[in-house]
Amino acid sequence: MLPLGLLPPETVEAWQSAEPDSAADFAGGDFAGDCRRYAAYWKLARELLGGLPAKPVRNDEQAHAAETIREKARAARQRFLERHVASVYEKLTQNYSRFLRVENLVQAAADAFPGLVPTADQIAEDAGRLQRDKEGVEIDQGIFLSHVLGEMRPGTHLCHAMLLPRADTAPYLEKFIADGFVDLGAVTVERRGDAVHVTLKNPRYLNAEDQTTIDATEIGIDLATLDPRSNIAVLRGGEVEHVKYRGRRILGSGINLTHLYRGKIPFLWFIQRELGFVHKFMRGVARTDALPDDVHGTGIEKPWIAVVESFAIGGHCQILLTQDYVLAANDAFMTLPARKEGIVPGASNLRLHRFVGDRLARQLVQYERKLLCDSPEGRLICDEVVEAGEMDAAIERVVRSLTNSGAVGAIGNRRAFRVAVESLDLFRRYMAVYAREQAYCHFSPALIANLERYWNAQNRAD
């Protein structure tokens, strides 16, 4: 029971009476009527939550009241979306006539369907807080996106939207075609002969991924893929500043755990990443006039070579599972420490077992097993291991080897492998599960406890 003494009894009673859960409310599938009823119910829920203190100063009874209100409001969102997600998506996209990226889709949903997902103001209010102090309103974005992705037509359309070149790629593309080089800050893109080299750069944080890198990374992948003067792309990490690795190249250390702990990585970051540049490694860049369904080969794509120097941790290990060829230094290693981070490791649960088998995949994800690149298990992911000092020459040799028969055959084989192991429909269904589960993980007390226990996040400088 909701502790009535904490909140105005009349507001509590009005909220409980407004809950649209009877069979009569859904008779005839009244979309417009349900929109009104649910919006009124969610509005009253927000008013009740607004009568409670902020999360960091709530006592146990107040925390219980807040959780009860949120759970009931979320249950109502589930019911609403189970009945109406297709109608919601049709309205937001004007009957599939426009493509909306996830960040724009959730904002449009907040405007068109009050209470279904948090508003920009609600997100902004939470954004300045430590992760442990956030209200968790972004979980509702995960619930919404899970339902969209769970339905074939809306989910496929959203995947298509996220595979299109970003709008902010266009100003850079003409310059890159002409000059063969673009510096995006967190990423540089450079054409060298027949190859485009994409270099990841976040040197202060061992090339970790965070909110400051995601846009530049996707633009860089767009440029490399769309460049008409090259036939293959190389992904490599830049040199870093950390005293232990200063001057060394590192592919990357995964998500920036310090930023995660400090609340600087929003939930949508995970979805933008997986549906955006990581998926583009796997499936290429889509065209607006054709579904990127693999069978008809309508996308624009290139083979990718990833270079593992020093290590590929977390998200950077996930990226390796989308690459056509992985070239590793003999002193490098890979890990997927999802348990210590308390999150789902992207699409690794979908892809990793194809490389290493189910048992080893579970050991990597759930028991943070470390793989040396130069080991029998590591070579299940790495195609070739070379001496660290010979990497530049090895990259040039692999580029020549993979392009000396032309790009057409390589791309055709990519598509043939992909349709057999990861259809767009399989990916969409996986992402429906991921959107929901990652949302709850992102705001779980266990995430904070893990970061403090294993990362000492509370004592690390930002």
Image (cartoon, helix red, strand yellow):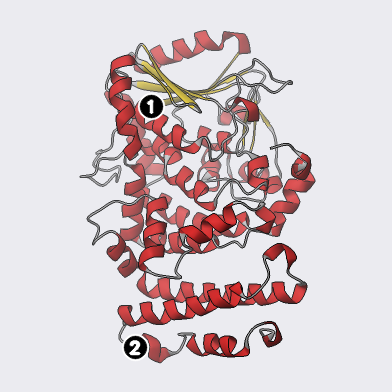
Residue 8, percent across and down?
A: 63, 86
In the image shown, does 336 or 186 lie closer to the viewer?
186
Task: Give the distance between the C-alpha atoms of the residues marked 1 and 2, in whole angstroms.
Answer: 52 Å
Q: Are marks 1 and 2 in contact (CB under 8 Å)?
A: no
Q: Which residue is mark 2?
A: 27
* Residue lying farthest to the left in this orientation: 289
Give the position of the N terminus as an image quadrant. Answer: bottom right
Give the quadrant of residue 412: top left
Disc ID at residue 303: 1
Residue 144, percent across and down?
A: 45, 63
Circle 1 Cα neighbour tier, 10 Å, few/some/many (<14 / 14–19 / ≥20): many
Residue at the image position 51 percent from the left and 41 percent from the top? 354
- Relative placement, left or right, of 143 versus 9 is left
Circle 2 Cα neighbour tier, 10 Å, few/some/many (<14 / 14–19 / ≥20): few
Q: Is residue 154 above or below residue 242?
A: below
**Mark 1 vs mark 2: which is more N-terminal?**
2
Report if residue 398 is visible in the image.
yes
Give the quadrant of residue 384: top right
Q: Is residue 226 above or below residue 40?
A: above
- Relative placement, left or right, of 429 versus 412 is right
Residue at the image position 31 percent from the left and 61 percent from the top? 92
Q: Secondary structure at mark 1?
A: loop
Q: Amino acid at mark 1?
A: Pro
Residue 409, percent across and down?
A: 29, 25
Residue at the image position 67 percent from the left and 44 percent from the top? 363
